[in-house]
Image (cartoon, helix red, strand yellow):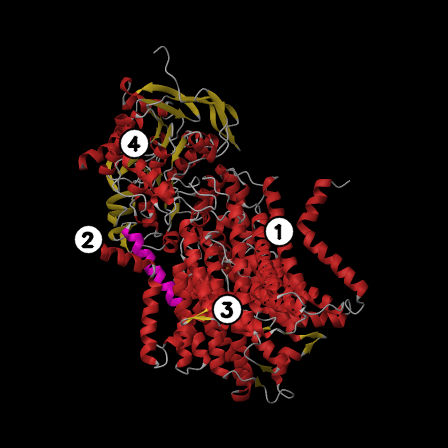
Amino acid sequence: MSEVKNVLSLHGISKFFPGVKALDNVSFDIRPGEVHALVGENGAGKSTLMKILAGLYNPDQGNIIHQDKHVKIRNPLEARTRGILLIHQELSLSPELSVAENIYLGAWPTNFFGVLKKRKLNKDSLIALSAMGCDFGPKVRVGSLSIAKRQMVEIARAQAFNANVVIFDEPTASLTDTEKEQLFNTIRELKARDVGIVYISHKMDEIFEIADRITVLRDGTVQGTVHTKDTNINLITKMMIGRELNTFFTRANSEIGSEVLRVEKLCRKGEFENVSFSIKSGEVLGLYGLIGAGRSEVAETIFGVRKADSGKIAWMEKEINFPTPRQAIDMGLCLAPESRKEQGLVLNMSGKNNVTLPHLVKYSNYTVMDWRRELATFEKYREVLDIKTTGADQEVVQLSGGNQQKFVLAKWLCNEPDLLILDEPTRGIDVGSKSAIHALIAGLAEQGLAVIVISSEMPEVLGVSHRILTMSEGRLNGEFSGMEMTESNLINAVSQHLEQTA
Amino acid sequence: MKQTLVKITTEWLMRNHIWAFLFLVVIFFTFASPYFLSINNLSNVLTQSAFIGILAIGMTLVMINGEIDLSVGAILAVSVALSIGLQNSGLGIWTSVMLALFSGAMLGFLNGSLIALSGINSFIITLGGLIGIRGLVFVYTGGDALIVKDFSYTEYPEIYLGPFSITAIIFLSLIAFFQWFLTSTKHGREAYAIGDNAEAAYDAGILVKRHVVINFTICGFLAAISGILLSMRLGTAEPQAGRIWELWTIIAVVLGGTRLTGGYGSMLKTLGGVLTLAVVQNGLRLMNTPNYVELIVMGAVLILALGLDRLFTSKTRENV
Amino acid sequence: MIGEKALKGFFKRNGLLLAFAFFLAVTALNAPAFLTVGNILDVLRQVSIVGTIAIGVTFVVITGRFDLSVGSGLTLLTVIVVDQNNIVGPLGAIIMAIFGGLMVGVWNGLLIGYLKFNALIVTLAMLSLLQGLTLWYSGGANVNVHNAQTTWYAFFGRGDLFGVPVPVWILLVGGAIASFALMKTRFGRSVFSVGGNETTSKFSGINAPKIVLFAYIISGFATACAAIIMGSRVMGAQSTIGQGYELNVLAGIILGGTSLLGGSGSIWRTIVGVAMLGFIQNALLLMGFPYYIQWLVTWVVIILAVWIDLAAKRGKILT
């Protein structure tokens, strides 16, 4: 009883990416039979740490001690043979293979000729499945199972490979309440068999329900590790945010004008329902919610990339039909989407061409592109936004995340929009670019622009917005302004909704 | 119990809609032509389908892997030319056949190795193969057709087991073997995992590159088998043998329901696709339609197959 | 002193052109007839048909898609333009061929752009369909232009302008126009954008299905132009006249260095690629090799070209 033994511990782990220190001297340990939650804002380093544990990244500095031995986890296979298993947020199963085959993927029992020993495979899998109380057999095709059941298949791997450490990455993101209970029971069973569990989640209520200890990460460093029974949501949130608000952020000191956009009872089946709000010129409206709450979907529907099922939309106090992206851009409604690389930029195009891509008509005479005007715009925004690039022809794929994000902004700012929707504008970029973008948002609002900032980073939303809407499970469930804009109010709003409906 | 049976049947039909389609086609031609539904004719259809069919087996394997092989027609021509050319130059029949099979496998191995080593898209590598391997045939034959000297060679296809020709039996046995291969061996099951998500398969410890090389080798070997059967049947080696057969093969496989994107498909689907293709060709000829109708119908059917596949995929997705 | 690294980089980037130059030099030494104006014009005349089609297909490939139907499209349109010469006269025949080419493009484009069907399969189906239509139209018989010696239609395939064959002019002028459209216009920019990242294009208000449709229409139009040249040159056609052209077109495009993944490429690269293939084939013939050796060489050249290109790009990302 003198000391608690760790199944896995990390000492002084650091990981660098070009321009960013993702992890800085992080130490972290997991004991057998405990659930250790890992919390932090987006970009705090949780996913990097998780990927190091699972062998997807190698640390630049530091040691990993697994079952009293110094080890290196060079690849996912090595992690698995050591008994360290990652349950992905996006599941990594092959739909055409059976449950049993997926459980033992890459480690199938075969005879000398490479023929599968199906009976053994199915028998072993059945043991793993029944230990978890699954109601489906090992021979079922995974493609015919629901998402929750597929997740069970992944967890069954832990059983099958006799895992000693299991990492869950946002496991409840796509589960119903009953399925969540089932998952928690499974986790408790793993716990009872002395498996060490790392639980990564944004949802505070879940963490306080299931975790024994909580480690808080912020900006790549550990803020502390505490026992769940010694703490509460507010303390954890403080640790996550850490800094004094308002010192980092500049809120626009702008004149609020007339209404720019009003949305009424916007619905899209399976994604969100009854979303109503409005925004005025000069206003910065924060939209806070967890990933998967339907925030991006709402933005994309207003912008016209997705089609609304029902609802009304009014632009400049006049009711209009739902626009196509083209119409939205032309009337001055712009969306800087969530994923820079997949939605925001054409990576192998030059910076100049990316900036003018949505405005080809504007930058051409009789369909012929006017490169002088294009270049003038490029140079203007390169200076305004302080973009570091070698020139107009450099492909944006070669730039850092922060500079890429500035190109996304330039792409919309040169349209001089009336309403700019920014979806996660500072995700995955360095601190310097972050504050530059926050200052820019304030500046734009002061010039009379309406700005919607969608973010899952609470300090960002609190710091830049005049008014905040919270969203959870496809519904708007709170509106805060002035003194009501506090961390605890926002957290309560996004996590209490579950209990109200249950 | 009854309901689950219905459910299972519908799910099977959703996944193997080609068989329902084949059934409709057969019904149609039974009424359209009195000659169609006779043992003799059907046995003929089966024999004729075997050549494309054997190519399609290899193609299915490669496609489940998420790759494509455009060179199968050319490899077939190599094996046709070698099996006849070598025995004419004095080697025994079976030695020639073995050498032809070996060279087919080697050409497949070459394709697969180039893809694995270079990381170039298999479409480009095998497009090159389609042009170049055909060139090899011309180099070997000098551009002329070879005619078999020992006519006993052309008598092998005349062996029948009931209504089944030896060619058809070989085709069906290969289908059965490779269906088993896909469902029951480690290699076969890995193909699905790789085709669905090569990166995840690699992370799980599957040797993706070696797997690709093996599949292309098998595909080349099967093309050679098809070539030998063809050479026995024709007794001549045209250097243009099997020209654009790779296209018909792809059509048959896609018609069956195997997806070009990988991770989905089976030999039974391919069998359905091959038979449908052969029945349509045969039926239209029995109806004395001009040959262009066949080409137009095949084009239309292929587009229809894409439409059906889209319909069924979106259905199954909704079920999840 | 030029840095060793820079020199290596130069060889890596231009290795293909250097190898080609070396090949030309060797050929010129072995076959004096090779580097004569007459022979060069001959080669260009020969590549002009493949080249004209390849210009159109390049648009399709830059959007990240394929067109395998151009070979049988060429056959059908050549048969039509030749046969209709005797019925409605050259002008009518040319208009019909162009109309036919546009229709093929519209069909491909609607199915691939708007219904999002797999381009490989749709154009394969179109290949089969067009072959069928050709046989239906001609009944498998050869067709000829009856007044081949007197018609002005001969201008497109057999004529000369300032000492250069008209088909070469068509290739060059068509190439220049296409290059301008691709590099300097709104449409061209959209083509690159759709091939580079379709989702981003959608988020930027670009109508991707429409762009894809137009790319296929251009491909169909280019095929029709090639058919007009072909018919004029041969003054006849049979149902196999365009067989295998889709492969030559793709080979030329790949050799030129346009990525089949879409988002990059250029018209002049395509023309260079097609011309390179033409010169290699011509050189091999002049050196006394049988015609089929050119296929073996094409095989090796394509794979080497793409491999070198890929290796060079990987190198670029690493440094």
Residue at left offset 39%, top offset 19%: A6
- Disc 2 designates what residue? B1
In the image, residue C88 lies at what x, y percent?
Answer: 51, 87
- Label 4 SS: loop
Image position of B227 with respect to C143: above or below: above
- Disc 3 designates what residue? C69
Q: Which mark is residue A203?
A: 4
Q: Residues within 10 Å of mark 2 (few under 14, many from 20)?
A: few
Which residue is more in the foreground, C239 or B282? B282
Q: Range of the magenta residues?
A: B303-319
Q: Do the CB atoms of the residues marked 4 and 1 lie less than 8 Å apart?
A: no
Q: Residues within 10 Å of mark 4 (few under 14, many from 20)?
A: some
Q: Nearer the viewer, mark 3 or mark 2?
A: 2
Asked if the stretch drawn in magenta spans residue A318, the answer is no
- Label 2 SS: loop
Which residue is more in the foreground, A173 or A118? A118
Amino acid at dot 2: Met
- Specify the quadrant of the image occupied by residue A409: top left
- Disc 1 designates what residue? C307
Find the distance from the CA under tag 3 to the CA under tag 2: 50 Å
